Image (cartoon, rainbow, N blue to C red):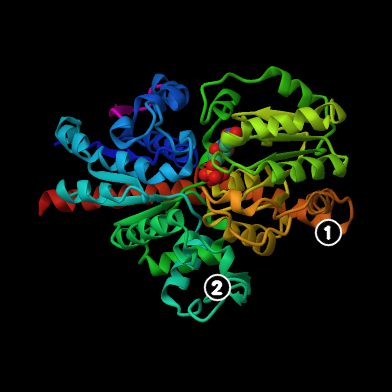
Amino acid sequence: MSSTLHFLVIPLMCPGHLIPMAEMAKLLAQHSAVSVTVVITPRNTQRYGAVLHRAIASGLPIKLLQLRFPASDHGLPEGCESIDDLPTFDLSKNFFAACAALQKPLEDVFHELQPTPCCIISDKHLPWTAEVAKKFQIPWVIFDGQNCFSQLTTHNLCVSKILEKLTDSDPFILPGLPDKISMTKSQLPLLFSSGNSEFVKERRIAHERIRERELGAYGTLINTFEDLERRYVDQFTKIKQGKVWCIGPSSNSNKNDLDRAQRGTKNSIDNELMKWLDSQHERSVIYASFGSLTRLTPLQFNELALGLEDSQFPFILVVKGGSRTEQIEQWLDESGFESRVKGRGVLIRGWAPQVLILSHRAVGAFLTHCGWNSTIEGVCAGVPMVTWPQFAEQFFNERLVVQVLGTGVGVGAQSVIDLGEADAAQIQVKRADVCRAVKMVMDEGKEGEERRIKAKYFKERAEKAMEEGGSSQLNLNRFIEDIRQHTSKGLIG
Ligand code: UDP
């Protein structure tokens, strides 16, 4: 029997999930007597392969297990293998059904994987992977795309009855937290939504099932670090009887610019963009991006763009229009926006090398939708944030940044806009709100300075966590040791 521990990593195919799991695979594979197989599909190998293949070429024991993604069998366009490729989010159900169809092919090849995997690390949104783990009698560990603050809050809301008597707009204090944080029901993730559209109902049921399954996981790996949210880590770890390992921030594991640029894309570094950044003053540029999934309505996009223009700061704005691209482009064309901001504002259409941009000395603030990856990448860059949450647990992340860490200013978003529901929302935030929040974050006065000092402190703590002897490194060691002991007990028993 081999003494090498072989981890089977099964990511959800969506940038916000696949990117950190690929980074985690690299971190695991750096340990002696550990090997990793990442389950992936052909299109995603093309997209993320550059970074993974470079890691393999450098000698890390990582293998890719490529399974055919049955897109067309489930009513998806051929080649649509990632949630951000979906032509409309109404097709999410089809996408998850196609993911679940990978169970049988995976089980068929399981025993061909050498050495036999000792543990599945899966995204929690793939609950069928728990059945694979059960069948082969190995632990099912979830890699959770959320931080401890969000997970603890979700847990507390599930066990408390507080939401029962509330309307969508009644403010309430989140129960059981060490800080006093107010929210409304309309800002909560889908699991707690009272929305009635088919999309919301269907996704809510799916989330309830995921939650039930999640409760039976062996443990949880989390892309966060202890110094960022210590009291929340402690409380959540207690609830999970110790089986919580905070091993992030995973993005800090990228040690060169090519790896930073090619997360989520095979594009090479955009020299024009980097030259433009080089020409800007230190900490002067606002980087504005809404992650991989959010598609602002054209009207909302206009307000964002005009707010950035009004702020007078140089900016980079990432445009992801999806099916609305034509309307957004038409507005950009007819309004003269691009010529007005020429030299001061840069638009990136499509995929932005986010971590590379954020690490540039010219970036002074990050206007973010508060997806957890983006948020923690902002933390790692040491920049204050302008927060504009959209969906899922993003309002929790906003509260963490603005109220707990004290490194951000909100634009004043009032309610979740679920993917697939954005048309109903049209405009939530006006250009004046955007301009106000950007100016506050960039303010040279005492408050602005305090936010920058805190942001710098957390950047330094993030670096420490990932260093030799840092908390995240030690937690990854502890996790591997836990699985080693579990595996050897299993072998003896
Ligand atoms: N990302 C990127 N370039 C883009 C859009 C997204 O590099 O143009 C990366 C970003 O750095 C992050 C991930 O994709 O690592 C998005 O995850 P997040 O949790 O922030 O948001 P989501 O896309 O899941 O809403």
Residue 419 lies, in percent from the top left, at 52, 48
Figure disc tally? 2
| Quadrant hosting residue 282 | top right
Q: Are marks 1 and 2 in contact (CB under 8 Å)?
A: no
Residue 174 is situated, as x and y percent measured from the top left of the image, at 56, 73
Residue 251 lies, with reference to residue 45, above or below; the image says below
Q: In the rendered image, which quarter contains the N terminus?
A: top left
Gap between marks 1 and 2, in whole Å?
25 Å
Q: Is residue 257 above or below residue 199?
A: above
Q: Residues within 10 Å of mark 1 (few under 14, many from 20)?
A: some
Camera-nearest residue between 203 and 476: 203
Residue at position x 80%, y 57% in the image: 450
From the viewer's perspective, is 181 left or right of 72? right
Q: Nearer the viewer, residue 190 or 371?
A: 190
Q: Report the front residue among 165 and 40.
A: 165
**Kind of residue indicated by mark 1:** Glu
Tell me residue 44's x, y (percent): 41, 28
**Which amino acid, by three-letter code, is at mark 2?**
Leu
Query: Does mark 2's beta carbon lie closer than 8 Å to ligand 1?
Result: no
Report whether 493 appears left or right of 230: left
Would you name the residue on which mark 2 appears? 177
Residue 359 in view here: no
| Magenta segment | 58-69
Q: Which residue is mark 1?
A: 447
Q: Is residue 2 magenta?
A: no
Q: Quadrant of ligand 1?
A: top right
Query: In the structure shown, which secondary structural element does the residue marked by tag 1 occupy?
Result: helix
